[in-house]
Amino acid sequence: MSEEEIEDPKCRAQRLRKEIERHSRLYYDEAAPEISDQEFDVLFRELRELEEKHPELATPDSPTQRVGGSPSQGFSQVRHMQPMLSLDNLFAKDGLDGLRKFVASVARSVPDEALEWLVEPKVDGVAISLRYEHGSLVSGATRGDGETGDDITKNLKTVRAIPLRLRGPKVPSVLEVRGEVYMTSSGFGRLREELRSAGQEPFANPRNAAAGSLKMLDSRLVARRPLDFLAFGLGEVSDESNLPSTQKGILDWLQSLGHRTHQWTKICRSAEEILGAISELDALRPGFGFETDGAVIKLNDIALRERVGDNARAPKWARAWKYAAEQAATRLWNVTVQVGRTGVLTPVAELEPVFLRGSTIARATLHNEDEIRRKDIRIGDTVIIEKAGEVIPAVVGVILEKRPSDTRPFDFFAHIGGRCPACGGPIERDPQFAVWVCKNPQCPAQKTRRLEYFGKRGALELDALGGIVADKLVERGLVEEPLDVFELTLDQLSTLNLGTSSEPRVFGEKNARKLLEAIERARQLPLSRWLHALAIPEIGEETAHDLARFHESLDDVTGSQLLQDVVALDRLRGEIAETNPRARKNRDKSEAERQRLAENHEKLVKEAQEIGGRLISKGFAEKARKKDSSNWDAVVKVGPVAARAALDWFASQRGKEVLQRLSVLGIRPQGRAPSHKVDAFAGKTFVLTGSLETMTRGEAQERIRSRGGNVSGSVSRKTDYVIAGPGAGSKLADAREHGVCVLSEEQFLALLDEKSSKS
């Protein structure tokens, strides 16, 4: 018998895990694999089969847990215990003077200190936060707005460069690791080819590919994406006493725990040395194998950072240096015009292919007619194109000395014969936005773009519904409106010809089933996704999330009293300003007129106060922070423009038809309207520190918010309660310093009890 045949299953599973983790470390950390991918897969399959046969042997940090599970129903929100701040920028044009000013501003906060700086590459990816408890990865989230992000734990567990369990004996009980998920250049190239062959629209750049992959609801699909990860810092740490004292030390420590960090860093002691390091990095970064869009300059000493502090959105002790956008010159041989989902006509430059920032560029945006006139861009010109992380490169100028003598000023209307290039319908110029618009709502190009928007990432996530597939579905008459996809059949999709009659290319059964599965999942997606997918004017992804937090269904949004109140409050603000008897324009009026204005003004203010108070009490607005603010100064969650647009859309014929169709299809998206009970939680701000035994932090945050409370990541004088569990760190000391009430987990649970809410 072989050793494997006689080995106890538990011991065999433990040995396989250690072996797989070792080979993963050799592959990802040291770039020195000892076995082939096929041999690695054999070990992995054996462990998976062993855990399936003996479920009691499966552990949360097993390598098999990286394989994606069943699709999510959308992402829940996670409140960052420490805010994920952005970085203020310095640009190449700022030069040495800009660096000197930055260094001097920091030096003023810590006089008589010798400052040391660390320069690191700025990876062009997606910032995330990983939370480890007792060494095991328990959750991972996007940056979001810095305070709250999407919980994408299942997706992040599929990224092999992220350790599921940390190495070492002295790992803090709570440790948040901040870093960047990105896609290598080679992996991005392979992914583009895969998407093209499946009839899907390829991503424009590696960063978009990484962001789009992490937003996918099916982690099994994420597992097949070539994602990577580099750690660059820390969030919350339960015990900071043994942490390294410098940024360089933290990077080395993270590496010892099993995380990958970038191997190129540079310690500098002056603005001149920082500029030298930035120049050195600029020369080296093309060889890194992934996109970088700049350098990060950080104060190396952690204690000095605490003294320098942060502003509202960014640390004062760090800057992101943005390299100058790379440019290239090439010939513009034609201008084509694209039609968007709202009928807007966008001119695109067709170029002689030129290599720029790792890719060959053959097209670039010209923005609109006014921009073409301003730059005097003509067909036949040699133009300068620029690519600085945009989705599509832009034409930024013309080399006039290379202009052919026979070129003529570009006439947008004449160039397309005064008709829509897609349907031949009439076009009109919108003077407000300086664009030409196709006025035919049945334009096939508009139908295609609406269908793409409906299924895009961040909306309904309809995998395989890329530009080519959407084009052909509309062209073959299978889809007139986006909701038609819910009536597509396997036979219609599998036989869909993505090519031509002379060169057919069938969509195929495999891709058809994949798309139908995504369509079926979309039925259960939350209200926020549907509000975004319906392409309601002024309702983008963030506004859709805000609306879904306060409404339970599409019907609730349709007649929303909250939105009506926002619109009414905005109208009243204007009327209050008009009737103010102390306003300059009203000072010359007669005493009787001023008295009448004053009475009307008082009545309007009272009405606005009532509406503002109602919005604040329901959590849909906050009191303004300025002095002497009143309820009618309330800062609303959704602005009046978006509120009015949503109400108008649902009241329109189009909105009514969509709601009726959804009802027939049996689709009823659900939101998560909070229950704002008037109790000990309403309007109070809570901070959590340390670990909880009876629930996760996410669950605790959700319980607080559902009762009308707020959760913050830092302690201030405005904090009402700090909930402190085992391993509580500096926030507990901050609470005592500010005289904030500290609750144990038991006291927090008692506060959650309805009977105890008055105490």
Image: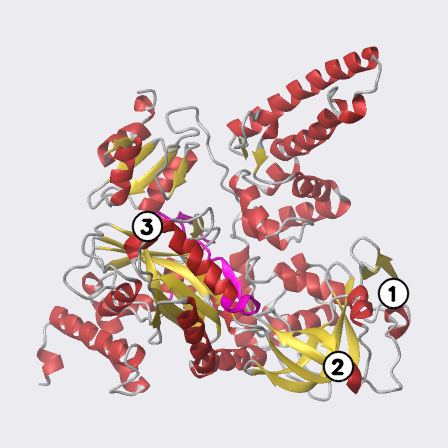
Query: Of the residues shown, which amino acid type is indicated by label 1?
Result: Gly
Write the residue at 24% across / 59% down: 245
Query: Of the residues shown, which amino acid type is indicated by label 3?
Result: Glu
- SS assignment at label 1: loop
Q: Position of residue 127 (x, y in %)?
A: 43, 61
| 79 within the magenta span | yes
Is residue 157 visible in the rendered image? The answer is no
Residue 399: mark: 2
Span of residues in magenta: 67-96
Mark 2 and mark 1: span between their CA atoms? 36 Å
Write the residue at 32% across / 32% down: 721
Assess disc 1: are there few (<14), some (14-19) or many (≥20) residues with their C-alpha within 10 Å of its C-alpha. Answer: some
From the viewer's perspective, tell me whether residue 219 is left or right of residue 653.
left
Assess disc 3: are there few (<14), some (14-19) or many (≥20) residues with their C-alpha within 10 Å of its C-alpha. Answer: few
Closer-to-camera residue (247/286): 247
Residue 306: mark: 3
Closer-to-camera residue (149/387): 387
| 362 within the magenta span | no
Q: Residue furthest front?
A: 112
Residue to which mark 1 is pinned: 425
Considering only vertical position in the picture, is 8 above or below 540?
below
